[in-house]
Amino acid sequence: MFLGDPSLPIAVSADKAKELIQTALASRNWKDIFVEKTKLFLVPYYFFEYHTYSEKEHNGEKIVSEVKKGVLVLDPETSEIVKGIAESLPPEKQMMREIPQEQEFEIKKAKLEIGGAKKIALLKTAEMIEKP
């Protein structure tokens, strides 16, 4: 199935996921563990770029003294900036655009709409970079 928005690539196969589940439960003394099937959940996040600058006065004129830019990720469930995801984003060409036909999946709906996300992203970014 084709995805409307790009997704991070699937990190582990369904078989590897089953193995990891069984290992984790066995380490907690669960017995006779059987994972019938796996399901992929696509959880939305808002990725956005920011650009900001500072000015200082030089010879009576304001000049740009510092420029900052970056990529941040907003979790639409908590309205918080998620650290670590933006830094580990793969190149655009490695992003997933289709889900294999045999993979069962569910797309979670974002609780925060894009308009609200933009406003929150502005505030959270200003807070993070300590700018008004």
Image (tube, rainbow, N blue to C red):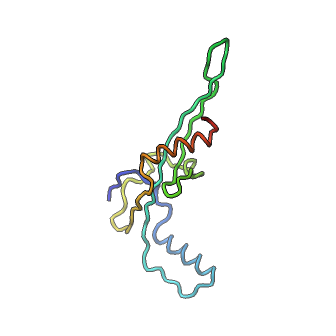
Which residue is pictured at 42% across the width and 48% down the height?
Answer: 114
Q: Picture coordinates of residue 29 (x, y %)?
A: 62, 84
Q: Quadrant of residue 132?
A: top right
Which residue is pictured at 50% across the width and 58% down the height?
Answer: 77
Q: How many marks?
A: 0
Q: Picture coordinates of residue 51 (x, y %)?
A: 54, 34
Q: Quadrant of residue 43?
A: bottom left
Q: Residue 17 or 68: which is nearer the viewer?
A: 68
Which residue is pictured at 44% across the width and 51% down the height?
Answer: 95
Quadrant where the N terminus lies? Answer: bottom left
Asked if residue 96 is positioned above or below residue 62 in the image, the reply reads below
Q: Residue 60 or 68: which is nearer the viewer?
A: 60
Q: Residue furthest bottom?
A: 32
Left or right position of 78 against 4? right
Q: Picture coordinates of residue 59 (x, y %)?
A: 67, 11
Asked if residue 41 is positioned above or below residue 67 in the image, the reply reads below
Left or right position of 46 against 125? left
Q: Picture coordinates of residue 82 (x, y %)?
A: 57, 52
Left or right position of 60 against 31? right
Q: Residue 40 or 102: which is nearer the viewer?
A: 40
Which residue is pictured at 59% across the width and 76% down the height?
Answer: 24
Asked if residue 13 is positioned above or below residue 52 in the image, the reply reads below
Asked if residue 75 is positioned above or below residue 66 in the image, the reply reads below
